[in-house]
Image (tube, grey):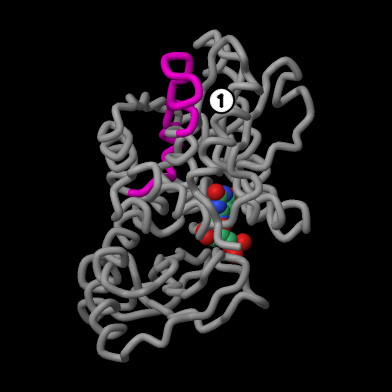
Amino acid sequence: MAFAAKEFVERAVAELRAGLPAGRAVVACSGGVDSTVCAVLAHRAFGERACAVFLDTGFMREGEAEAVRDALAGLGIPLEVVPVAHRFFRDLAGIADPEAKRRQFRATFYAVLAEVLRAKGAQALVQGTIAADVRETQAAVKTHHNVLDLGPEVWPRDLLVLEPLRALLKPEVREVARYLGLPEGFVRRRPFPGPGLAVRVVGAVTPARVELLRRATRIVEEETADLPAFQAFPILLAERATGLREGTRHYGEVLVLRVVGSADALAAEPLALPWERLQALVARLLGELPALSRVLYDLTPKPPATIEWE
Ligand code: XMP
């Protein structure tokens, strides 16, 4: 049977109200379609009792906060940006193992959110966790940042967590987004992981390496905007490679391009890009980012790879 967005929204709003009959809620927004849909549902359910926040972790893309602020403003929902990049960089410093990094990101994420809830006198967190996030975390594929199975030392027992999208997959979330009146460009927005660039800089993160990847990400997004990709993004490897710049040896950074098609993120295929497109993209990356010495294209489907590198 086709998914019925209207019925889903009515039920989700009623369930949110039943979950928090009185008191205040904080909605964690990341700029993605899942959490933005959540913010709209919470606004319908709670009105002034809900407040939407965006944690500026330092690992977001250029213009991320502005994109979600504009999308929500169009629906009359204000967004508060919480600047916490220093906390994330401090807590992640020196952590190179991918799962350790993901677990630390998640711990800092919830510690900060718990503080935000306390500061706002809120009793509940509303978050946009979807079925794929839960499945992958429970199957021990990878720890998604928004799957909360942490002890009371991180998430206090007296604070509620409401997850209206927990049963949905991506295509259904997009239908709900469309039904709620989010702009079409936003509805079709490519997914971006909550830990963001932290899981795309392989190995330990530093502000300089994250900034390099942020610039590369903007270039890749601009150059692939017209492609029917589920996701298209670069990854910065931990290894360097020997190259040649202006006639001298250059032991530079290595970037991997990941451009995949997928319906629901549970399986994915690399796109067969025309060679000229790849060449043009590589030329732009190497021309604008002198730190690079190589760019590779990832041909691996999911499975056996995952979409993200870490
Ligand atoms: P993988 O890499 O497991 O990713 O094939 C599947 C989808 O989930 C996104 N992803 C995340 N989303 N928090 C999120 O909100 C996370 O921690 C996270 N890790 C991966 C990924 O971009 C892809 O769309």
Query: Which image quadrant for residue 256?
Result: bottom left
Answer above or below: position of 5 versus 258.
above
Q: Is residue 193 above or below residue 43?
A: below
The residue tagged 1 is: 113
Give residue 18's position: percent from left, percent from top.
65, 22
Q: Quadrant of residue 81?
A: top left
Point 42% across, 32% down: residue: 54
Q: Nearer the viewer, residue 28 or 10?
A: 10
* Region of the chain picked out in magenta, as a range: 41-61
Q: Is residue 310 visible?
A: no
Residue 78 visible, this angle: yes
Which corner quadrant holds the C terminus? bottom right
Residue 280 position within the rendered picture, expressed as x and y whole percent measured from the top left = 23, 81
Residue 73 vertical position relative to residue 296 in the rendered view, above or below: above
Ligand 1 appears in which quadrant? bottom right
Viewer-side residue, 37 vs 81: 37
